Image (cartoon, rainbow, N blue to C red):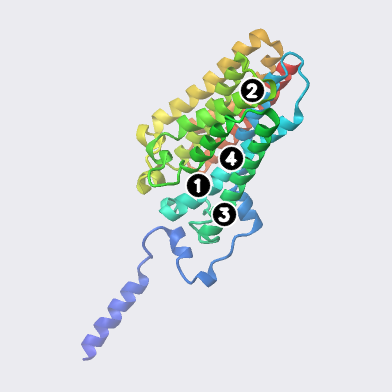
Amino acid sequence: MAGSTRKKKSRAAHHAKQKPRGNPQRARVSGDPAHVTRATARDWTGAARLRTLPLAVAPVVIGTGVARLDGTPLRWVLALCCLVVAVAIQIGVNYANDYSDGIRGTDDHRVGPARLTASRRAKPRTVLTVALVFFAIAAVAGMAIIIRTGYWWMALIGAACLVAAWFYTGGKRPYGYAGLGELFVFVFFGLVATVGTTFVQIGTVPQESWFGGVIAGLLACAVLLANNLRDIDQDRLAGKRTLTVRIGRRATQVLFTVLVVIAFALVAILAVFYPLAWLAMLALIPAACAVLIVWTYRAPRELVVALGLTSLTSLALSLLLYWAFTG
């Protein structure tokens, strides 16, 4: 009996010394819900991913600049409504991603800061509600544009934008998990946002708007590549087949560089006709720094800086192009 008791105590001590298995972040929040710290205002702001918001602002700024090419007065109400639509959809997408990835378990493998849903600092239903509120804000602003312009068919485009925003990571077969995220980002946060902004203000789409849309779309794709490069190992474990997971690190680094180079090559073409656009080359400074980080990073967290610099590049380019078009 004494020998048996000693063996049981030894086994118990052995199990007590073992390290917890699974994702350490998951382990910290898997206990009593009463001990989980509730999300603060700072957490909710962080979940909105403010670094990505310049990607929503840039196409609206470029599109508005093109709309004023011939000295057309600024239609500030329509421009403001376009800005609200773009920013609200961007924030809504970010919260929707937090919700969808959280309930799917994708964020259980995250190395970076915990998301609201995955960390259980906010209820999934609450995160979903916030996402839907921002989508509703975008819809209301979009309806204001439609009523003011009379282009009722644009409701179909608005609906397509909201559907694309949700199914990026939502639904049974999210396209973001199939390597199509960059394609949809290019279309909606590049072409649709820029061309749409120009069209609702002047009723036509000059070729400068298409150039601007491509520039904005390429840089938005570059930001997504930097984000997915940071998460490549975690996404692979979670079964999230992003374009980066499919083509690998080296090809992603090459593609990131190519997208940035093409964007500035298009700016150079515009500068031939709008000399002030040469000033947009000043945005090469943060862009070059982002490219350097993407090629030399040692820790995934460093790519957060590259992401922010690329987003800043997009905003700087848009403001300088606006000046070139209206100067």
Which residue is tagged 2? 199
Query: What is the spatial separation of the Cα atoms under label 3 and label 1, in whole angstroms?
Result: 13 Å
* Secondary structure of the residue carrying numbered label 1: helix
Residue 58 on image: x %, y %:
64, 29
Q: Residue at (76%, 18%) from the top-left corner? A: 72
Query: What is the spatial separation of the Cα atoms under label 4 and label 2, in whole angstroms?
Result: 21 Å
> Counting other residues with Cα less than 10 Å from the Cα at mark 1, is it few (<14), some (14-19), or many (20 or more)?
many
Which residue is tagged 4? 90
Which residue is tagged 1? 97
> Mark 4 near mark 1, Cβ–Cβ under 8 Å?
no
Upstream in sequence: badge 3 or badge 2 = 3
* Secondary structure of the residue carrying numbered label 3: helix
Residue 280 on image: x %, y %:
66, 20
* Secondary structure of the residue carrying numbered label 2: helix
Which residue is tagged 3? 129
Query: What is the spatial separation of the Cα atoms under label 3 and label 2, in whole angstroms?
Result: 32 Å
Query: 286 left or right of 13?
Result: right
Point out the frontmost of discs 3 and 1. 3
Point out the frontmost of discs 1 and 2. 2
Residue type indicated by callout 3: Thr
